[in-house]
Image (spheres, helix red, strand yellow):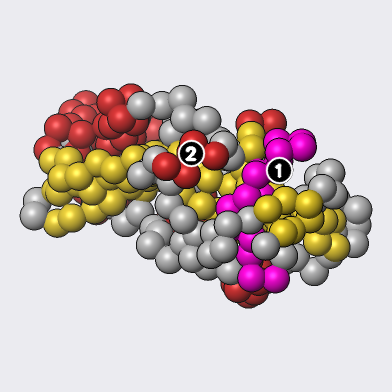
Amino acid sequence: MEITCTQCAAQVEVVEGEAFAFCPHCDSSLFLDRTKVVFNYRLESTVDGDAAEAALRRWMAGNDVVKNLDQEAETVSRRFEHFPFWRFRCRQPSGVEQVHLELAHADANAVMRRVSVPAGGLKFLRPEDLHEESFIRPDIPAESALQWLKGREGLTTTGELLEVSLVFVPLHRFEYRHQDVMYSAVVDASAGGVHPSIYPVRSETPYLLMGIGSLVAFFILGVLAGTDVTLKLWLYLVAAVPLVGASVAVARRA
């Protein structure tokens, strides 16, 4: 079976039943989708497993998650893979070009859609890459992915479709346990970005109660002081000391 290279128009021999092909004339990497032949790219991995887990722990130490998550969370599994994405480059009616990604394999975490693919980092897939277990072969056709992309809220591809390509992005996929509940996260191995799914969030209730209590305390003191401005200021200053101490205690515990 032969196909035409989309880069140099040369005829490329394809093994029966194989979806990947490599042009010997221009070194292009090609993928045979159900209805078209597209370019096939990969991104280099620059973040190893230990660095990825360190980035995940730094995120766990942030202000958005439950306190001490970085210390209490137990990493259950860590898996490195080159995950396939369909990359659609479109030109909108305004003339602005946009690039959208859609998952090309069904075994995916929804947060993977937050992964970005820098155009400057794309390289053609190499024949030897296909022998690595980390490369996940796509099982979602480009046309199906495009329809999902069009139907997803906030994304439009109503303009001219300029390019469709397949991109393998290196990712570290983590599963971790906190208080007997399992969570997952993805770390981009090309850029180091952390993309968590559902995670244990820090409760805002103590801060809200502290704020409401402070407002009530100052209101009562203001009423007791009446129109005496000097007394009111003194009462506010005296009350501020224990309230600040209570706020610090809440911040440490919450």
65 or 198: nearer the eye? 198
Residue 193 visible, this angle: no
Please report the bounds of the magenta region as a residue range: 19-35
Q: Nearer the viewer, mark 1 or mark 2?
A: 1
Image quadrant where one finds the N terminus:
bottom right
Mark-to-mark CA distance, 1 and 2: 15 Å
- Earlier along the polypeptide chain: callout 1 or callout 2? 1
Q: Is residue 22 magenta?
A: yes
Q: Residues within 10 Å of mark 2 (few under 14, many from 20)?
A: few
* Kind of residue at disc 2: Asp
The x, y position of residue 62, in whole percent, is 32, 34
Q: Secondary structure at mark 2?
A: helix
Residue 41 visible, this angle: yes
The label on residue 129 is 2
125 or 108: nearer the eye? 125
* Kind of residue at disc 1: Cys
The x, y position of residue 124, in whole percent, is 64, 38
- Residue occupying the point 39% across, 33% down: 229
| In-image side of 130 versus 133 (left or right) | right
The label on residue 23 is 1
- Residue occupying the point 46% across, 56% down: 137
